[in-house]
Image (spheres, rainbow, N blue to C red):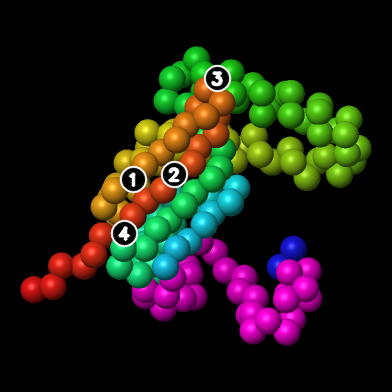
Amino acid sequence: MLYRAFKRLRNKRTYPVLSLFEYSPFKNGSFDAVVCGFSFRDAIDFERTVSELSRILKEKGKLIIVDLGKPDNIFLRTVIGLYWRFLVPIIIRLCFGKLGRLYSGIYMTYCRYPTNREIKRILLRFFDRTYMKIRVAGGALIAIAFKPKSLKA
């Protein structure tokens, strides 16, 4: 995907970067905003990831996460887990055949993913204000976190 994007934007002063969330190659305060579109769930260490994203944001920068959610309620969490474990693989397999196997890992990601409440707790450790919209019975979330302005001594 990165290669295709680079080919399309070849003459637009873009530079592809491949790295891990937890070890970002960017300088402190490099970005006004960071958007994680269906990628945050693939972080290895969520606490470290949010710390790094905060580090590379400028003062008053925004972090926006649009991703799967994991309900705090055990019943809803189980129902959505069953959906990812059994229903999604069937639907994907019917629609995409063998290519559907690429999506089979989402359930394992869901299993190790923090709950919505835990995500908010992690965000509040590194950001001033955090707003979360929970959708689909907790199975989808949109989070916006604002980096505070640094206090000068």
Magenta-span inclusion, residue 151? no
Quadrant where the N terminus is found in the figure: bottom right
The amino acid at mark 1 is: Thr
Q: Which mark sits nearer the N-terminus, 2 or 3?
A: 3
Q: Are marks 1 and 2 in contact (CB under 8 Å)?
A: yes
Closer to the eye: label 1 or 3 = 1
Classed neighbour count for the residue bearing mark 3: other residues with Cα under 10 Å, few (<14), some (14–19), many (≥20): few
Q: Which residue is situated farthest in the right direction here?
A: 97
What's the magenta region?
4-31
Question: Is 19 a magenta residue?
Answer: yes
Name the element at disc 3: helix
Please give the label number shown on residue 143.
2
Label number found at residue 130:
1
Q: Which residue is mark 3?
A: 78
Residue 140 picture location, percent across and down:
55, 34
Using the image as rendered, state which of residue 30 and residue 84 is in the foreground.
30
Compute the Cα span from label 4 to label 1.
9 Å
Q: Could you tell me the amino acid type at mark 4?
A: Lys
